[in-house]
Image: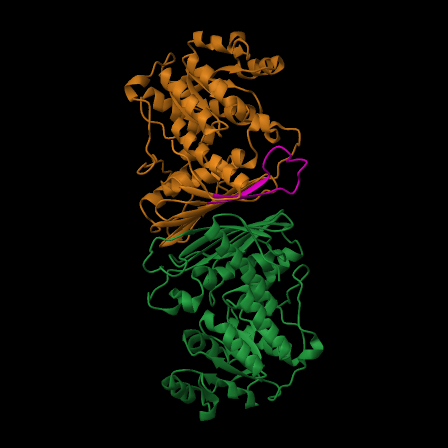
Chain colours: A green, B orange
Amino acid sequence: MEMQRRPFIRTTLGASLVPLAARAAETTTPGKLGWALVGLGSLSTNQIAPALQMTTRSKLAAVVTGTPGKGVKWREKYGLPAEKIYNYENFDTIANDPDVDVVYIVLPNSMHREFVIRAAKAGKHVFCEKPMANTPDECREMIAACAAAKRRLGIGYRCQFEAHHLEAVRFAREKVFGDLQHIDAGFGFAIGDPTQWRLRKKLAGGGALMDVGVYALQACRYLSGEEPVEVSAIETKTDPVKFAEVDETINWLMRFPSGLTAKCLTTYRFSGCEGFTAYGSKGRFGMQPAFGYGNFKGWTSNPEIPLAFPHVDHFLAEMDEFSRAIIEDKPFVADGTEGLRDMLVLDAVYRSVASGKKESVGKV
Amino acid sequence: MEMQRRPFIRTTLGASLVPLAARAAETTTPGKLGWALVGLGSLSTNQIAPALQMTTRSKLAAVVTGTPGKGVKWREKYGLPAEKIYNYENFDTIANDPDVDVVYIVLPNSMHREFVIRAAKAGKHVFCEKPMANTPDECREMIAACAAAKRRLGIGYRCQFEAHHLEAVRFAREKVFGDLQHIDAGFGFAIGDPTQWRLRKKLAGGGALMDVGVYALQACRYLSGEEPVEVSAIETKTDPVKFAEVDETINWLMRFPSGLTAKCLTTYRFSGCEGFTAYGSKGRFGMQPAFGYGNFKGWTSNPEIPLAFPHVDHFLAEMDEFSRAIIEDKPFVADGTEGLRDMLVLDAVYRSVASGKKESVGKV
C-alpha cells in the first residue's frame, strides 16, 4: 500500500483566508514551532502531548492549566521549565514568551471563544479543538480577532489530514466512482461518566451533535465539496435524566446545491456507528471506522481500487500541517472559516430540531 | 451454509387478520392452487410466470390482459386453453372459473384498488403487488372488500420470505447484536424510459418512494418490529422534466417508540444504493444488495456469524407461502394490514415533503 498524501482540492468551498502577506511567519524556534497546550484533560494528556513527541515541525513549549498538580506532573514528564507552566490568571503574559508560537485550545467548547481571542491578542497563532465554538457569531468573533492580530487560526479537524479521508476526497473530486449522489454518515458512542462536562450545556454548548456529529457533517462537506443549503432533523431522547441538558441522538438530512443529498446520525447512546458511505453514479466507497483516533478501515465497490493506508498519528499530522502552513506562509484548509461553515450547519440542525421544520443554512 | 427459513416473529406488529374460520380453504385443485395473473408486463413475463413453473403449491391457471397479442403468446408459451385468457371486460366472469383460486394483481399501482376489489367480489383470494395502493383509504377499502368476501389478501413483499431477510429479523429479535438502535436503509435505481407508467402520477400514484422506497421502509419495520410514529422528509429533484409528475429522490427520517431511529433514501436518479445497515448495541449487520431479484449479499460485524444463504426465487417463495397459508388456513404475514401500515408511513413522508415539517404517522 502506498501512502498517499494530497492536499484537499477546494473547488467549491472557497477558502476565505486572511491575506497571506499579513500572516508572515515569525518563528522564534526555526525548524520547529513551539506549541502551548491550554487545558490538560484527557485529549491533551493521551493524544496531543504524545503526538508532540513525534512531530517534526512542532514541539511542546508550554502548558496552561488551572490545576497546579497537573503542572508539576507535566514539568516532570516533559522536562518543561517552571515558567512554561501557565495558569488561567497569568495566561495573557504568554504574549511575552518567545518560545510559544502557537496556542492550542483544548478546553470545553464554551471556553473556545474566550481563549482563542485572548491567544490572538497575545500575538500567538491559534489552533482550536472542534467544535470551533457554540454559535456562528462566536466563530465570527474568533475569526475577526485572529485577523485583527494578523495571526493564523486553525481548527482541529484531524481527518482532513488523514490519508484515507484524503484519498476518499480524491475519489469524489476525480469522479473515480462517478458523480457523487448521496452520502450516509454517522458518528456516535455510548457516553460513560454522567458527570462529565460534555453533558453540561453550559460547558459543551450541545451534546452528541456538537461533539461527534460534526465529524459526520465534515465528511459530507469535504467529500461533496459543497455547502448544504437546507437541513431537516429529528431528535430522540431515551434517557432524559442523563441527557437533561444536551442532545442524546439526532438524525438529520441535508440537501446540497448539485442535488446531492446526505443523511446523518449522531448519538451518545450507542457505539458502532462511525463512518460514511459515499454513493457515486458508478460505484460506492466508504469507511468504518472513520473518525476515531485510529483503526480506520476503508472499502470501495471495486476490489481493484482499495482505500487502505498505514496509520499515522492524526494529531501529529494536523499540528505539523498547521506549523508548516505558518512557516511556509501557505493556506491551511481547516481554518476558522471552515469551522464557521460547520457551525452554520449545526446551528440549522438545532433550529430544525426546535422548529420541527426544514431550516436553511446561514451564510458565512 | 444452512438454509434457514423462519416465520417472522411478530411481537409488536399486531396481525389483524380476518378470523381464521372465515377463510376456510376451498381449493379446487388439490395440491396446487391455480393463480391468475392480471397484467402481463415485464414483472409477470420475466419473473412471476417463470417462478410459477417452479412452484410446488401454486400453478399458472389463467391470465388477464388488455392486449390480445400477448394472450396468444402466453397461450403458446404456457399451454393455456383459450378460455383462460381473460381481458379487462370479461374479467369478472373469472368468478365462474373453478381453476382459479388466487388472482395476482400485477397492474400499475393506481389500478390495484379496483382490481383487488373486483377479484374479491369474484370470490377469489387476492395477491397484490406492492405498493398496495395509492392511499391508506384505498388500502382500507381493499382489506374490507376481501374480508366481506371472506377471501385472503396478500401483498407482494418478496423479502419477507427470503432467507437473508428472515435471518436478519432473527438477529434483531434475538438480540444477536444487542438491542437494535438504528437502521440505515435505501433503495434506488437510475430509471430509464421516460415514457413508462412509473413516471405518470395517474398510474403510479408516486415515484421512487412508492416503487422502491417501500422496500427500505419495509426493512426498517420488520427489522425493528415497531411502527414509526414520526417522520421527516426532504425531496430533491434534479430533472424536473422527467420527474414532472412524481418524486425523483426522497430522504426521510423515522422515529420509533423504543427510541430506535432510521434514515432512508429512495431515488430514481442513480443505482447502487440498495440495502440496509442495522446498528445494534453489540454490533452491526446488513445487506447490500438487499431488495432486487437476487444477488443478495449479507454481512455482519462478527466474522463468526455469517449472513449468507443460497438464492431461492423470491416470487416462487412468496406465492407458495401464500398458497400454503390458504391451503393450511394459517396466517400470512404480508397481509393487507401490512400493506396499509406501509402506506400510512409513505403518506406521512409525502405529507412531510409537502409541509416541510415533521409529520405523525396515521393509525390503522
Work out whether A16 lies above or below A350.
Answer: below
| Pick the front one: A66 or A9 | A66
Locate the N terminus of chain A and report the quarter of the image it occupies. bottom right
Q: x, y percentage for residue A151?
A: 62, 79
Q: What residue is rendered at 65% in x and 82% in y? A: A25
Image: B287 above or below A269: above
Q: Is residue A24 magenta?
A: no
Q: Position of A326 compared to B234: left or right?
A: right
Q: Position of residue A172 (x, y in %)?
A: 63, 56
Residue B235 on image: x %, y % = 57, 42
Question: Quick check: A25 left or right of B144?
Answer: right
Q: Nearer the viewer, residue B31 or A45?
A: A45
The magenta region covers B232-253
Which quadrant of the structure image shows residue A44? bottom left
Task: Identify the residue at image location x=38%, y=61%.
Answer: A245
Residue furthest left as drawn = B21
Is B109 drawn above or below residue B292 in the view shown? above
The answer to whether residue B19 is visible is yes
| Quarter of image, res A168 | bottom right
Q: Is residue A301 visible?
A: no
Q: Quadrant of the C terminus of chain A?
A: bottom right
Toward the viewer: B103 or B266?
Answer: B266
